[in-house]
């Protein structure tokens, strides 16, 4: 792969996914895209890049973007954001939305589904308090491949060992051959949709809680600012945004500010407060 080909690929990925590749990641490009070449019968990365330049094969273009997208995830990843939901955010929403009995959550980089299903399990554990509530978990990802895996809810033994309490594996999963499948009742709680965070997501409506963890780290500063501003527009006036441990809003937007008590938790800045808008009711599940 020549320097010019690498620069074209960097520009292509930035435009299509927001991924900001630095020069030292050239080895990553070669290791992840070589299997894509084999899949489409292309002799080299140069041939693959030539196909991208022709812009005539959307399947190849999607395969390249998905191959370069990091989908590292596991159940209850980093634990604290989920303890925070159970102990603080959920009780706050229960009190705040008591009159309309509606809760909307968005997992904005859902990958293979472990994050939204972790939240679904927490909600199921809290089912008595949510009786009669309309609960919606919207889970989105750029990759159609991981979304299809998430919808199936099928995980390897290794995947269910990562972060999932044994008692919940027994309670919420059924063994299917050498894999484990999460209960249909939990799968039905999650509405999976393909979504590119670089594009408009205004049609999703507003959310009480947004998880957008460990995706902004792959964007450059202008892209981070743009995405954060648009996330703020989808966040209910007293809603909560959770970012990854290495992510922040500081210096990127004045619409959001850190919660002084909880690292990784953000809400609307006072200057950005605005009236609530009624969110659309789609794929809502009653608990």
Image (cartoon, grey):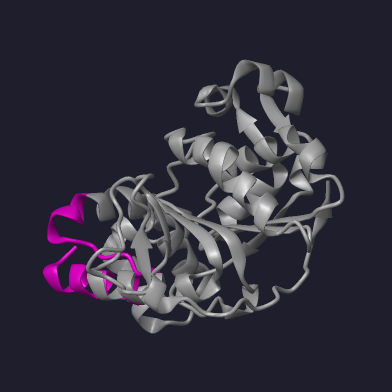
- Between 189 and 93, the residue placed more toward the observer is 93
Q: Find the magenta span and give its range.
A: 1-27
Q: Quadrant of residue 72?
A: top left
Magenta region's main secondary structure?
A: helix
Q: Is residue 230 left or right of residue 133?
A: left
Task: Give 81 or 148, whichever is nearer the viewer.
Answer: 81
The image position of residue 110, as x and y in percent, is: 54, 52
Residue 8 visible, this orientation: yes
Residue 144, compared with residue 246, is above or below; it is below
Work out whether residue 134 or residue 193 is closer to the camera in this orientation and state it.
134
Seen at 77% across and 40% down, the residue is 129
Task: Name the residue: 62% across, 32% down.
Answer: 155
Q: Out of 220 and 79, give the one closest to the viewer.
A: 79
**Residue 173 can be seen, yes or no:** no
Q: Is residue 251 above or below residue 69?
A: below
Horizontal side of 232 relative to 176 (left or right) equals left
Q: Position of residue 224 (x, y in %)?
A: 32, 69
Q: What is the x, y in percent for residue 276?
A: 62, 76
Check the image and report above or below for 19 versus 242. Answer: below
Q: Where is residue 61 in the image (x, y as percent from the top left)?
A: 45, 70
Residue positioned 50% across, 26% down in the render? 162
Queried whether the magenta region covers residue 21, the answer comes back as yes
Seen in the picture, residue 239 relative to 51 is either above or below; the reply is above
Q: In which quadrant of the rendered view does residue 161 lie?
A: top right
Asked if the stretch drawn in magenta spans residue 281, the answer is: no
Which residue is located at x 19 percent, y 56 percent?
26
In the picture provided, is 115 more to the left or to the right than 16? right
On the rendered image, what quadrant is the N terminus found in? bottom left
């Amino acid at each position: 792969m020549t320097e010019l080909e690498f620069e074209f690929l960097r520009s292509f990925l930035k435009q299509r996914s927001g991924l900001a590749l630095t020069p030292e990641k050239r080895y990553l490009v070669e290791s992840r895209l070589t299997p894509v070449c084999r899949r489409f019968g292309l002799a080299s990365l140069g041939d693959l890049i030539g196909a991208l330049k022709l812009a005539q094969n959307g399947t190849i273009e999607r395969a390249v973007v998905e191959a370069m997208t990091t989908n590292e995830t596991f159940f209850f990843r980093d634990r604290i954001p989920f303890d925070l939901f159970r102990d603080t955010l959920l009780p706050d929403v229960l009190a705040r939305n008591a009159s309309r009995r509606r809760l909307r959550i968005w997992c904005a980089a859902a990958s293979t589904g472990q994050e939204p299903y972790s939240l679904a399990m927490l909600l199921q554990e809290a089912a008595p308090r949510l009786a009669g509530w309309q609960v919606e978990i919207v889970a989105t990802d750029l990759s159609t491949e991981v979304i299809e895996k998430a919808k199936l809810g099928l995980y390897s033994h290794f995947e269910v060992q990562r972060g999932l309490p044994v008692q919940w594996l027994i309670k919420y999963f059924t063994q299917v051959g050498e894999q484990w499948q999460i209960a249909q009742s939990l799968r039905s709680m999650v509405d999976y949709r393909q979504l590119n965070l670089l594009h408009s997501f205004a049609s999703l409506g507003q959310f009480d809680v947004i998880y957008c963890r460990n995706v902004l780290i792959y964007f450059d500063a202008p892209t981070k600012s743009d995405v954060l501003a648009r996330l703020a527009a989808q966040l209910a006036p007293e809603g909560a945004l959770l970012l990854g441990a290495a992510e922040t809003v500081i210096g990127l937007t004045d619409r959001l500010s850190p919660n002084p008590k909880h690292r990784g938790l953000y809400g609307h800045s006072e200057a950005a407060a605005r009236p609530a808008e009624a969110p659309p009711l789609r794929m809502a599940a009653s608990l």
